[in-house]
Every structure is written in C-alpha cells, then in structure tokens.
C-alpha cells in the first residue's frame, strides 16, 4: 500500500477514536447484567460455551421446571468452573425444583437473556418495529430492515417468511411518508441517492428445498418468493439487499441476484444490492465477475461488503467434509481482503453503489481515505452497522460521514436466537475489533495498523507447521475422501454428462469373471432403471452351481501365492484400486443413480466410502502385517502374527452397491484371502464396476472372482461349499440368519469352521427431547428417514417424541414431508426417488395398510409414473407393541411415537430386537449423557442425523439381531478375515543367551 495513504488512514482512525473517547458499546457496559456476563464469558472459555448454548436453548424452555433443570445442568459446577454470582446463585437454588426461589431465579435469568436479545432487534411485532425504525431515522440513521428467521423446513414456512416481509413493508409504507429524506434529498432519496425504505433479505429462507445440488431449482425456487417482495419494494420506491449466507448458497445467491436485476420488470430500477464477504477467498473473483456482468448488461447495482458472519461454521464444516477451507484463516487476511476489495468496488463506483459494513475503525477509515483519494462522490457510497452493536462506532461515523445505515432485524425471539448467538460470538471473539478496542483495551496503534504488517508479524511469530501426522510404513495417515461438494459447478455439470454416458453404454452383456477370464452364460438377468423399468442398463450373466464351483476353484488355486505376497504389496494394489475409483468417481456414481435410484449426493458419497474402505483397510493390513513381539523376557521370542483364512464368499446388498461390496471384498483381499463375489441382482452393473477396478489395479487372476447369480440357484451352494472359509454378508436379517445356520453345518471335505460376518437389519429410532432444536431435528429426521427412500440399514424408521414438544414437532415434520419433491433421482430437484424393485414397492404398500390399521396416517404421498414409486408415509399413534415399531420395512415409512418422558422414549428406543443405529436430539447435557450410557445401539448419533457413518471416524455395525462381527471401517474389522498365530522360539543355547535391545534386562 502506498505509505501516504496508509498514514492518512491511521490519522483518520486516530481522529475517529478521539471523537468517541470514553464511550463503550452497551454490550460491554459492566454496569448492566449483559456487560457483566459478557465480561465473564470473555475471561472464561468454558463458561462462554455453556452460556451461548444456554442462550440457544432458552426459547424452548417454556416451563419453570424445565428452565431450572437446564440452569442447573448448564451452570452448576462442572467444567464451566466459577460462574458469575447471578447465574451461580440461580443454579444452586434450582436444586429445589419447583421452589419459589428457583422459579424466581429462572425467571430473572430468562428475562435478562431476553433483554440481551432484544438489544439486537428493533421489535418482535411489526408495530413496535416500525415505531423503532422511525426513531432510528429521528436519530439520523437510515435503516435496512431484516426479518429474523433462517431455517425454513417446509414450503409453508417459506411462504410465511415471504408474507412476513410483505406485512412489514405494508406497515412501513404507511409510515414512510412522514419521514423526511436525509441531506440534500432529491425525489425523496436519502443523501440524494438512497431510497428511505431498505430491506435486507435472506434468500435460503425463501425456499425450504434450496440446495447446491439443485442449483437451477434453488435459484428459481427462491426467486419465486423474492419477486413479490421486491415488486412491493419497488412500488414503494425502496431498495432491497440480498444478504449473503453460508458458502453453500453463495453461487445460487449471485445467480438469482443477476436474474432478478436483469428481469424486464426490474431492469430499469437500480436499487438492488447484494452482499459479498471479504473472508471468502473467491470474493475478488466474484466481484470482478459481477462488475463485468453489470457493465456488459448496462445494469448498475449496489454491493455491501462485509467480512462475513459464518467464519466458524465455514472452517469447521470444510474440515469435517474434507473440503478446502474456503475462507481466509488469519484475521488480518480478511482485513487485507476488505481493504483491497473496497478499492476495487470504489474504482467502479460509476456502476456500483458501495455499502461498507464494518465496525472496525481501521476498515472504515480505509474506505474513507480510499474514496477521498479516488475522489468518489459521496452519494456513491455509504456506511452500515448492526443495530444494537458498536454504538460508539456508529455515532462516530454519523459525525464524520453522515451516511450511516443500521441493519435492523425484527421478529420473534425464537427464530432470532441464531442471530443473537452470532452477534455474541462476534462481540466476544478473541480477534474481534470491538472486543479488542472496547473490552480488552488494545493500543490504538495496533488496532489501526496496516493489516499487512499485522499479518507479517503473526506469520513470523507462528510456530512451524507440524509435519503430516505419523505414517504407517511410508503411507500417509488415513483421511476420508471429501464428501460431495455441489457448490463446485464442474461437479454439477459432470453428473448429467456421466449419466448420459452410462445410458450410452446400456444394453451390454456383462460376463462373469472367473480366474481372470470372462465367462458368459445363457441365463441372464436384465438390470434396469427403477425410475423407468423399461430402460435396461445391462444384461447380466448368471452363475449356476458349476460356475460357482469354478470360481471357488480359481480362488483356491490363487490363494497360496496371494497369502504369501507381503501385506505391503497387497496394500499397494488396493491403494491403486482406490486411485482408480477416485478418478472415476462421477461415472461410478452415475451408474448407481440409474441402477438403484440413488440421489446424486448419496451416490457420490457411496463411492467416496468405497474409496475410504480401500484406503483404510490397506493401511490396516500393513499395520497388522508385521509380527508383534509378545512379552519381553530374555531367552524367549514370542511373535504374534496374522494369516488369511482362505476363500471368502462376499454376498453384497444393493443399497450401498459399491461401498459395502468394496468394503467386504477389500478387507478380505488385502488381508490375503481370495474372494468369490456375488453382487445383488439389482446392482450387478455397479458390482461389475468393482470388478473392472480390481482388474485395472492388477489383482492376480483368481484373487477376485465376479460371480453374480440367482440366490435361489447358487446362494446356498456358495455358503455351504466346503472350500469356503469365510462368508461376509450384508442384507436382511432373514438371509443373514439362514447363512449362519447353513455355515454352521460342516460339509463333507470341509476343513474349516466357517466364519460368518453378517450386517443385518435395523429398526432405528431417533428421540426428540422436549428441548430439541427443531430446525435441526426435522431436517435430520427427514433426511434419515427418506434419503434414498429409507432403504438404508441405518435409516430412521421410528421417531419417538417427548409429549411436550410433540404437537410442534409433528406439525412441522408433516409440512416438511409434504414439501419434499419426489421423482427420478437423476433429476437433482427430487429428494426422494423410486424404491429399488417391485418387491420393495409391494412391501411398502403392504405396510401402508398396517399403518392405517395401527395408527393415524399423517402423510401418504403416492407417486404415479412408470417407476417403482412407493408412498412416502408418516404414521402417528404407534406404540411399542405395534408391528410398525418392531418390523423392518426398508422403505419410506416413518412411525411416530409419543412418549411421556425422555426416560420412556429411551426405553422404547431400545425395545426392539435390533441394535444398529439411533439418534437423540436434545440440548440437555444430562439426557445426552444418559443416552450415551443406555441407548444401546452400535452407532448412536447425538444432535445429528443417524445415517452416513464415515470410515475410520464412525466405525459401523450393530449387535443383537442387527449383526454379528466387528464394525466395518474400524480397527477390528480386518482381524475377522485372519487367523492369529504365535511362534515361540527358545533362544537359550546351553545357558548362553543373547540379550536383545527390547528384552527386559538389568539397567
Ligand atoms: C450492516 C451489516 C450487514 C451485514 N450483512 C451480512 C451478510 O449479509 N452476510 C454476512 O456474512 N455477514 C453480514 N454482516 C456481518 C458481518 O459479517 C460481521 O459483522 C463482520 O464480519 C464483522 O466485521 P468487522 O469489520 O465489523 O469486525 P472485525 O472484528 O474487524 O472482523 C471480524 C471478522 O473477521 C473475520 N475473521 C475472524 N477471525 C478470522 C480468522 N481467523 N481468519 C480470517 N478471518 C477472520 C470474520 O469475518 C469476523 O466476523 C453484516 C454486518 C453489517 C454491519
């Protein structure tokens, strides 16, 4: 940066500070409850976490008993440590449940927190909000009004959100005539350039089904509700700004902004703005793109530049999903970006009306001085601040710039809590300008420093980056394959292309592959698209018993050499297979979309999981491949090591057609076994894809044999074959139990006790506690129950809801289910597709009858069409003894059960013979703890959906009738395919004993 400009910025900043000396934002005012509590939160991280979580749950604590219990659970003792007296006293007293003191204290705490929340909003009711907006204008500030509410889970809620805007706008319209424009107003405009009425709008709330996967549908879905709002604003002569939310909506938002701005109805009206976030690495590109678009179209527009409100979310989600972190990760980098982007926008001020939204005096001063340097007319830029925050800054701004707009949220406190938590985080973050200047008393010079220098100093002081985590024998540590990221335009584009490619190859005959050779048989089964069963994707040769025998012989012949190949060499081939699957990930996903009706994202993540299994088990094989010394006594060497068992039969399901197939097969093979693989006849094309991957990876002939066949013809034969030592199965409980029975019987010539690893069914429940976050819980339940049409062993088929929240939950759930789009999975707008075949379809219809008999059907969505569509069903009134509470349907039927209490919900949740997955949505620490102990299932998920276990992070598998064997994707899985052996050598020769380094010996 030019040093003169930098000096001017710092001088400007100093003058700014001087003009507000001695003032402090109200949130830090220790004379009041909020200030005291904030002060404590900033000194005590544990307390801060508890406090913010408590603020989040508070609107749900509607009885005094519930409130007292939560106060106690959140604040009494524990990690939060010392607590401000006001809270502590309440917590201690709340031991006397129902006592007058506890009630009073609960009330006091609630009203203090509600007071804190009210500080950031202009009103809960329209009338109050409009009154306050008038007052704000009286004080000399312009406003932009925002209706609180972010998560809408149904179209009804999105309608309500739109209507909320229309309502407040009507109220403002009546009032605005009495507002005089600020400054030298022309045509009623503030400062000669800005409409008096200004609304900010969150796009995602306007369409409950918005998702990056369905880019086009999301843009149009949001626009459909945004247009009437903008139309009204235009009729009032107002302005609208489209807020920017999380990254997943960024490109959708930019696109809908362009469309709205360019529509013939609105083209000639220039008062539409968009927000961009400087913390996002891509923002410079986005701004340049918007400027180029605006110039090409001849469309001026407004741009609010913020740093960004979702920094914590974006970083954590990117880490969890395995995506590149999209935001700058050092605070000065965001400051630098804001300064750079502000200049870029100001340089284009003939086209773009700039809105600088920041409470940072350095950032603001930069805009002022850059605008001065570039001689930008004052009516081409303004400053903005959030209502209820940074009062000294906005006052100072009003003095020096005059043109200040306050962002004024209005609406009920309940949907406002997410907003409040973001504001509290923003105020108390270690690097927050407000905290540093008004709470921590950081020196002005530091606060006004050129962020480039701050960054350089930070980098110089940063400890060196730790090396990549320890590796196993030259292999890097395992990392999950990134999950599908449909914000990436290329991925969205690749799917239809890959689907067309699979279609282009339709009609092939798929041979068996035995001992490295292709074998065709006359018995063939077509594999079809369940959304359009007339579409035959391939014709699959079926193995009879003769081919099964040949495959087992080939596997047996290949076994000795493969067993004697080192674990490292075996792992290298499996890792090569992982690389091939990664290269072909979209093509492999497209096959599943067409063959089993998986939605794009679900299919992509299935292939990702397959890659994870390959990567994870390869490392596990190397880990287990070195003999381990047991004991350290001198004169004796004991080595424990593992050997493969022999021929493994892998019998795979269609619901995770690649992941589970690859998981079972790769585990067996990398451990040194050879495999005869029987895919499901409903997903043999996907299974063939696995055969192609292993072939290309260079597995020796006979190690893997692709052997699809009719279960009735060759299933038992494979299981009972005397040369099969291990059977890895995933599928229904009935088949799993039958396999165990058959495998237990020793056949003539059999040399092994057969090992059976069987993943079977589930009747999984999610509990909704009385304090559950329903925005999250409804989306989690809907996804768990209806994603891939409920055809996952982990799917949620029962939701057990605590009485006091039941009505609210059920009405929102019903609306959410009514809002899902149903249709072919190849169209990304559809959240639910067809079930896999007519048998599944029939089964679901039969259970629908049971639902009508046993409960009250709340939702029944029948879909017509050529595909195997089964109804989406939600049935209430189900009790533990009902069939719908006990029997696995494996389809889109969700049973709703009303429990009297959390304890009863827990008891019901575990009252089936299955124990696979489960979930709890609760914000009670004590209930969560209890669930950890007593909700006995293989995989329990707290406050999230109950599907989508990740290899290495959530090893997957259940107990009881849900399966036998150890969890897939976990550290014990491979051991099931191996025999442990121990060799002991006596190293003493006539009393002479060499002492080794690792012997236990005298010092
Ligand atoms: C009128 C108005 C409208 C707004 N509208 C939106 C909107 O539509 N969308 C939106 O997302 N936000 C919006 N915001 C919120 C805004 O993003 C925050 O208020 C703003 O980021 C705080 O920045 P600051 O310059 O005031 O404070 P500072 O304290 O200087 O900056 C804090 C910001 O720095 C960034 N940051 C913090 N830590 C790091 C780190 N380690 N690495 C990199 N960056 C870091 C974060 O963005 C954080 O918010 C709006 C704010 C205002 C005033």
Image: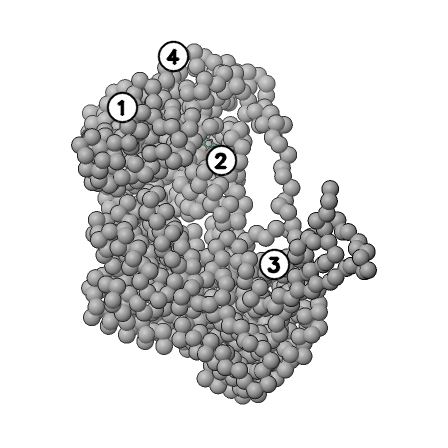
Q: Mark 1 and 4 residues: CB-CB less than 8 Å, in contact?
A: no
Q: Residue 418 at x, y = what percent?
A: 34, 38
What residue sits 66% from the left and 57% below the top?
630
Question: Which mark sits nearer the N-terminus, 3 or 4?
Answer: 4
Q: Residue at x 63, y 82 (%)?
A: 553
| Residue on which the image places disc 1 | 136
Closer to the camera, 507 or 901? 901
Looking at the rendering, the quadrant in which ligand 1 lies is top left
Is residue 883 something that shows in the picture?
yes
Label 4: which residue? 22
Q: Residues within 10 Å of mark 4 (few under 14, many from 20)?
A: few
- First reached walking from the N terminus: tag 2 or tag 3: 2
Query: Pointer 3: what residue?
Result: 620
Label 2: which secondary element: loop
Q: Viewer-nearest of labels 2 and 3?
A: 3
Residue 18 appears at what percent x and percent y? 43, 11
| Rendered view: 349 above or below 529 | above
Q: Nearer the viewer, mark 1 or mark 3?
A: 3
Q: SS class of the residue under badge 3?
A: helix
Q: Which of marks 2 and 4 precedes in the sequence?
A: 4
Nearest to the eye among marks 4 and 2: give it.
4
Residue 583 visible to the viewer: no
Tag on residue 279? 2
């Amino acid at each position: 940066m030019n040093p003169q400009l930098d000096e001017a910025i710092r001088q400007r900043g100093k003058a700014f500070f001087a003009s507000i000396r001695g003032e402090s934002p109200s949130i830090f005012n220790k004379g009041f409850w909020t200030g005291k509590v904030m002060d404590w939160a900033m000194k005590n991280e544990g307390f801060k976490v508890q406090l913010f979580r408590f603020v989040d749950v508070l609107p749900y604590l509607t009885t005094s008993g519930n409130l007292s219990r939560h106060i106690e659970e959140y604040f009494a003792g524990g990690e939060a440590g010392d607590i401000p007296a006001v809270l502590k006293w309440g917590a201690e007293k709340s031991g006397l449940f129902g006592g007058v003191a506890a009630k009073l204290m609960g009330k006091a705490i609630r009203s203090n927190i509600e007071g804190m929340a009210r500080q950031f909003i202009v009103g809960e009711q329209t009338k109050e909000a409009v009154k306050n907006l008038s007052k704000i204008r009286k004080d000399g500030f312009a406003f932009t009004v925002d209706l609180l509410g972010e998560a809408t889970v149904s179209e009804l809620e999105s309608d309500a959100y739109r209507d909320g805007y229309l309502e407040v706008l009507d109220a403002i319209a009546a009032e605005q005539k009495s507002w005089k424009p600020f400054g030298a107003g022309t045509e009623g405009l503030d400062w000669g350039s800005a409409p008096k009425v200004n609304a900010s709008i969150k796009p995602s709330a306007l369409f409950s089904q918005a998702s990056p996967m369905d880019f086009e549908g999301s843009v149009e879905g949001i626009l459909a509700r945004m247009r009437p709002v903008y139309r009204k604003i235009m009729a009032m002569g107002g302005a609208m700004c489209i807020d920017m939310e999380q990254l997943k909506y960024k490109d959708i938002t930019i696109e809908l902004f362009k469309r709205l701005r360019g529509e013939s109805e609105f083209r000639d009206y220039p008062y539409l703005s968009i927000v961009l976030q400087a913390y996002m690495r891509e923002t410079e590109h986005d701004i340049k793109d918007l400027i180029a678009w605006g110039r090409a179209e001849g469309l001026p527009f407004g741009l609010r530049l913020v740093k960004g409100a979702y920094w914590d979310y974006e970083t954590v989600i990117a880490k969890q999903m395995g995506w590149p972190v999209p935001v700058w990760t050092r605070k000065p980098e965001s400051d630098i970006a804001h300064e750079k982007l502000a200049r870029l926008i100001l340089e284009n001020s003939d086209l773009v009306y700039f809105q600088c939204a920041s409470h940072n005096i350095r950032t603001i001063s930069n805009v002022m001085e850059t605008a001065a340097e570039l001689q930008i007319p004052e009516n081409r830029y303004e400053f903005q601040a959030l209502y209820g925050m940074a009062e000294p800054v906005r006052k100072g701004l009003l003095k020096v710039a005059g043109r200040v707009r306050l962002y004024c949220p209005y609406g009920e406190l309940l949907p406002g809590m997410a907003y409040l938590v973001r504001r509290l985080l923003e105020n108390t973050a270690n690097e927050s300008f407000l905290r540093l200047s008004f709470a921590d008393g950081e020196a002005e010079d530091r606060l006004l420093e050129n962020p480039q220098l701050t960054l350089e100093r930070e980098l110089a002081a940063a400890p060196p980056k730790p090396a990549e985590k320890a590796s196993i024998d030259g292999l890097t540590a395992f990392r999950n394959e990134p999950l599908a990221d449909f914000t990436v335009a290329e991925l969205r584009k690749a799917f239809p292309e890959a689907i067309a490619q699979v279609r282009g190859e339709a009609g092939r005959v798929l041979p068996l592959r035995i001992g490295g050779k292709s074998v065709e048989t006359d018995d063939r089964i077509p594999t079809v698209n369940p959304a359009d069963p007339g579409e035959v994707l391939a014709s699959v040769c079926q193995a009879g018993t003769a081919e099964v025998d040949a495959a087992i012989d080939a596997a047996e012949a290949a076994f000795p050499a493969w067993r004697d190949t080192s674990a490292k060499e075996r792992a290298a081939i499996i890792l090569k297979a992982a690389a091939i699957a990664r290269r072909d990930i979209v093509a492999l996903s497209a096959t599943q979309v067409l063959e089993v009706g998986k939605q794009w994202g679900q299919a992509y993540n299935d292939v990702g999981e397959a890659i994870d299994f390959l990567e994870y088990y390869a490392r596990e094989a190397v880990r287990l491949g070195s003999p381990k010394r047991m004991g350290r006594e001198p004169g004796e060497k004991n080595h424990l090591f593992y050997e493969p068992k022999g021929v493994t039969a892998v019998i795979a399901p269609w619901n995770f057609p690649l992941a589970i197939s690859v998981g079972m097969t790769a585990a067996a093979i990398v451990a040194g076994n050879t495999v005869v693989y029987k895919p499901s006849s409903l997903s043999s094309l996907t299974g063939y894809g696995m055969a192609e991957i292993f072939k290309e990876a260079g597995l020796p002939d006979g190690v893997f044999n692709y052997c699809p066949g009719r279960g009735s013809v060759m299933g038992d034969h494979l299981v009972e074959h005397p040369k099969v030592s291990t059977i890895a199965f995933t599928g229904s409980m009935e088949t799993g139990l039958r396999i165990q029975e058959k495998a237990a019987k020793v056949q003539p010539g059999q040399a092994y006790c057969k090992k059976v690893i069987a993943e079977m069914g589930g009747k999984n429940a999610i509990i909704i506690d009385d304090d559950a976050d329903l925005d999250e819980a409804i989306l989690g339940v809907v996804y768990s129950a209806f994603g891939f049409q409920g055809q996952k062993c982990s799917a949620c088929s029962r939701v057990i809801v605590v009485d006091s929240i039941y009505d609210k939950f059920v009405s929102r759930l019903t609306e959410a289910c009514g809002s899902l789009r149903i249709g072919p999975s190849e169209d990304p707008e559809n959240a639910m597709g067809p079930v896999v075949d007519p048998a599944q379809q029939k089964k679901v219809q039969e259970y629908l009858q049971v639902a009508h008999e046993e409960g009250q059907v709340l939702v029944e969505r029948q879909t017509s069409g050529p595909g195997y569509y089964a109804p989406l069903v939600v049935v209430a009134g189900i009790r533990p003894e009902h069939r719908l509470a006990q029997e696995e349907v494996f389809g889109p039927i969700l049973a709703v059960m009303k429990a009297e209490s959390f304890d009863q919900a827990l008891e019901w949740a575990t009252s089936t013979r299955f124990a696979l997955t489960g979930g709890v949505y609760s914000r009670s620490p004590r209930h969560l703890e209890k669930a950890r102990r007593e909700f006995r299932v293989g995989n329990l998920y707290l406050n999230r959906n109950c599907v989508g276990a990740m290899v290495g992070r959530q090893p997957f598998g259940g107990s009881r009738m849900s399966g036998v064997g150890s969890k897939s994707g976990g550290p014990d899985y491979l051991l099931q395919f191996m025999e442990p052996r121990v060799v002991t050598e006596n190293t003493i020769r006539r009393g002479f004993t060499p002492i080794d380094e690792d012997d236990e010996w005298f010092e």
